[in-house]
Amino acid sequence: MTAKSTRDKIMKKLLMGLIGAAFFALPALALDAGDMAPQFELRASLDGQEFDFSLSSALADGPVVVYFYPSAYTQGCNIQAHEFSVNMDAFEAAGASVIGVSLDSIERLNDFSADPDYCAGNLAVASDESGDVARSFGVSVSDGPPGGFADTRGVTIEHGFADRMTYIVTADGRIAETFGGRAVTPFDNVQMSLAAVQRIAGAPSAL
């Protein structure tokens, strides 16, 4: 084998390795409008009381807003939970329900769901500790920093984080709208969710 052919062979292996690395480094692709929403069941909490949440059961009563968020008791997620909570009557008037999903433990969510400043007993939140449900929706999940960091109460968070992403799922199990990411503030995320379910219901939107 000549020096040139040996060099070409090495370069080909390096190139294939780089392509493979780039492929596995690609971010998750969020599901989009028209896709079927993955069905899931998770342990959830409402006003500090645990229950078994089933997406299929919730859809039997109408559209469901499934929103993924990084963690309870962090700044943006506190805002988002509060806004969902104070607007829950409007969501219900549009025939929709809301479930928040994070990698928090159910114990953390029992506190969060009952906290009068945030979920205030109005908003249900579910524990996806493995991140499997988030990934099934194409939501990126990342590890927390080594050693964790303090939440807004000063309690150390040691779990991973799902990106902020919201799905409007219609009663037939299909995704009607998807939005999230850093371009959408936690406040706007809630207002966009409410406008979406009002459009589905044919009700006038506040936007």
Image (tube, grey):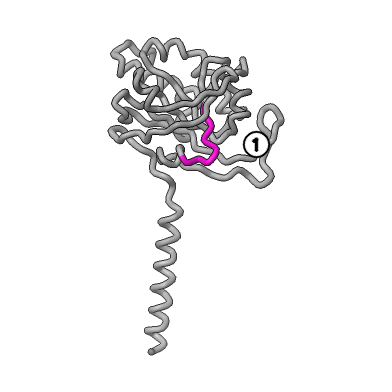
Residue designated by label 1: 157
Based on the picture, tell me whether residue 17 belongs to the magenta stretch: no
Image point 58% across, 33% down: which residue?
104
Horizontal arrangement in the rendering, residue 110 relative to residue 8 (left or right): right
**Residue 149, quarter of picture:** top right
Camera-side residue of 107 and 77: 107
Task: Give residue 35's quadrant in the image.
Answer: top left
The percent position of residue 178, horizontal first and vertical second, equals 37, 31
| Quarter of the image with the N terminus in it | bottom left
In this rendering, the answer to whether 56 lies above or below 207 is below
Judge whether 117 appears above or below 100 on screen: above
Mark 1 is on which residue type? Answer: Ile
Identify the residue at image location x=37%, y=84%.
Answer: 5
Residue 80 visible to the viewer = no
Q: Nearer the viewer, residue 99 or 2?
A: 99
**Stretch of the chain drawn in magenta:** 126-132
